[in-house]
Amino acid sequence: MTTPTKTATRRGALKTLAGGAAAASLPLWARYTHAQSAEPIRIGFQQHRTGIGAAYGRWYGRATEAAVGLINANGGITGRPIEIIAEDDGTDPKRGAEVVEKFANQHGCDVGFGTLFSHVVMGSAPRAGELKLPYFVVSEGTHVSSGMLNRYTLQPGITDVRSQVIAMAPFITDTLGKKVTMIFPDYGFGYDHRDALGPAIEAQGGEVLAKIAIPPSETSFTKYFPKIPRDTEVLYHVMVGPAVLTFVKELGEFFGGRGPELFGFIDSLEAVAIDSPGLDFLEGSHFWEGMCRHQQADESAHETFYREAVGVNARGASVNDPADVSTYGHMFGCWETLHVIKAGMETAGYRGPQDRAALIEAVEAITDMPHSREHPQGAKRFNGKTHQVFGHQYISQVQNGTLTRVHTTAIEDSVYPDMVDYTTQAF
Amino acid sequence: MFRTVSVALILMFFAGAASAHASEQGFVLLLPTDVYIAAGGATVALTVVLLAVLPRRVAGALFRPLPCATWLPRPHPVLGLLAAGVLMWLVWRGVSGPRDPMLNPLSLSIWVVFWIALVSLQGLIGDLWRWINPWSGMAALVARITGRGAPMRYPRILGHWPGVASFLAFASFLLADPAPADPARLAQAVIVYWAFHMVGVLLFGGPWLLRAEGITLLMRSYARMGLLGRARGGLALGLPGWQVLARPMPSLGLAVLMLILLGSGSFDGLNETFLWMGWLGLNPLEFPGRSAVIGPNLLGLLLTNLGLIAVFTACLWWGARLAGDGSGISLLIRRYAPTLLPIALAYHIAHYLTSFLLDGQYVLAWLSETLGAGHVHVTAGFLNSPGPVRLIWMTQAGVVVAGHVIALLLAHAIAVRAGQSARRAALAQAPLALFMVAYTVFGLWLLATPRGA
């Protein structure tokens, strides 16, 4: 990190000098604006502090704090420190829009950042677009690349569900089996998986035998299991919510260890210890992980650095309390997004809100991001047209209570055709 | 595990405030809560049976206080002034401090220190509120400066009803406002509420505080549940609830407020459940946020309270008919409403226990940072493991059951004191007892059922 930081600081200092020379010939208002550039870069952090996203919000906060600490210790952005202004959105779409408004009108933020829950992103992004506030979400939703949002909304630090699912399909059909049954919650999140996985499995010569939708309020699942076709080779499950532990337990009891292969998404068990009593049935099953929660034998120095900076141990839990398991599969998105903001601002020569469009153009121009301290999850490729990043996905198997990585997908495995070109939209 | 429990126990002496963790509920759902709920209901039912067969004076004797001091400490008005000063400082921090409610001393003080911890301690210990009432000091100061009492006389006809309205306004903010923890929003609410009642106190004097200010009424009601209280000019100690028997019967307005304490607390639990969200047609896994349920929550708060008042009244009316008691319904409500205080208090403590353990850490973290004692790591680890989760749930259930048992004992003692024989008292209470057994099951179910908000 030392070398790039020095470069960044030097570059920042040069820009400031150049700006100073130019300032003498500027009109008064512009000189005033320039004088403000000694001020911090204000990043509005839309945090799920209360409401259903609070567990994620806590860890998104820690990853953010660590990344900002690192960036500031190394000279900030163009020589200016980052100041995080955290506002609680209550995991509430309407409040999300209000928070975005506060960032733009009240707190004088340069950008907004950090939203996870899809419905909050959907509720907030239109307002960010109207206020022309660059809005960097860390949400996993396919809504950004779908074209539903606007030019001011970007997702450069975390991959989306559609790309994750289609990257999984070849591993599922090649390694676990070609006859797949899906169990998913009966609403949007479940449908994203249902709609993306079916075609991807079929493209690999596999077959989805049954799609079992479970009502979101269900708390007992045994009655659904007889619907699983007998010749199912892989059971793909993406249950979420408080009943997920019950789901796993009842599934294990139903099959008694002789059932199909299990493939799940770590979203179901984020912030839950995988070796908790009652989850024993997961031994041997496979999970998608955004980032490997348990330290792997070949973990990169970048990831080890990230783990230490955020304060997470080898089991993905807090170093202060080993029972406090992090949302490891998602929170790296905050760290990486902040580094993208930094890179974008430095490229754009960002001085203040008047350069917001230039910032977006600079981020849109980003393509490859190498595996580095800034991108500890792995190398990524940003698609400036769709405002969505693509990256490696990890498949882990539970072996002796530890998530052990057994497969890494290529970036190409997760790419799908563009659904929008935001760069054609006016600012 | 031991460490976690120790941390939890240490925290119980401080205070805690926000939403429950999904994984904690996951572990609760794995517990055999059906069995625990049945056991809780059976315990309360057994108490009913015991009371019917035991000598009639037993319940009353349990609540006899022990004198522990011949003097009574009196709060100095300066304390009230100090409390008002602290409140004003907190409001200022609400406007100017961090936007994050978990870092802002106003949000932490109002929802964790006051609403969760202080209200619970008031009910467990006794009248702590009179020492820190943020209106009384100002009122005393103004009286001293002007050398006169209040310029206007509080209209007696209003009784405690303005206080009922005042508490309902507070409960509506707590349960239906989209962002009650938002520091700036909370600062506005606090200053408006404080100023409104300050004007009332300056115009009408002390009676305004004792009849029209909802928080003071709530606190004075819960003080009746405290171990410590006033008896014969001194300080006395007794089983929680002894002061309910020692104090005069409340007015109808105050009695209704006591019912509303329970009703609002119950709705506080109910509005988070999958069941309630199902009624509203909402997906609990994708809760649209508090903004989307302002109307339903206001209506739910109102209907829950009206429903509780109706069922309670019906039980009293039915019991009086069974026992051939000719007392009017208003007198019956005034007589028995205080017996619901232990249930309301127990549910308050149980409902907020998890928030207290989690958000109390933010209070400690804030204190530690402010005093320069270093960083306190806030952990939710104890909610991610089955052992601590079971311990927390059993504690909550134990508190709820104990609250109901005390409520039954109090109701029995009051019936006996009203001159009824043990048999008649038992008859008169049969519907009320049935109500309390059912409410035990309901309260425990609220703690066990999955929540989505």
Image: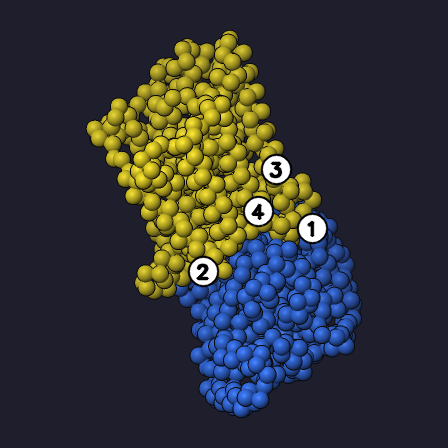
Chain colours: A blue, B yellow
| Distance between the alpha carbons at the discs numbered 4 and 3 | 13 Å
Front position in the image: A424 or B287? A424
Tag 1: amino acid:
Ile
Q: Is residue A86 above or below residue B114?
A: below
**Image position of B370 (left or right of A380):** left
Instruction: Report the residue marked by disc 3.
Output: B300
- Cα–Cα span, label 2 and label 1: 45 Å
Mark toward the start of the polypeptide (2 vs 4): 2
* Residue A332 coordinates in the image, percent (x, y): 55, 71
Distance between the alpha carbons at the discs numbered 1 and 3 = 28 Å
Characterize the local packing of mark 4: few (<14), some (14-19) or many (20 or more) Cα atoms within 10 angstroms: some
Q: Do the residues labelled 1 and 3 touch (CB within 8 Å)?
A: no
**Quarter the N terminus of chain B occupies:** bottom left
Q: Which amino acid does label 3 sit on?
A: Gly
Q: Do labels 1 and 3 share a chain?
A: no
Q: Which of marks 1 and 3 is in front?
A: 3
Closer to the observer: label 2 or label 4? 2
Q: Which chain carries label 1?
A: A
Give me the C-alpha separation between circle 1 and circle 4: 32 Å
Q: Give the percent coordinates (x, y) of residue A139.
A: 63, 65
**In the rendered image, which residue does mark 4 sit on?**
B177
Chain of the residue on which disc 2 is drawn: B
Q: Which residue is drawn at 49% across and 12% down?
A: B327
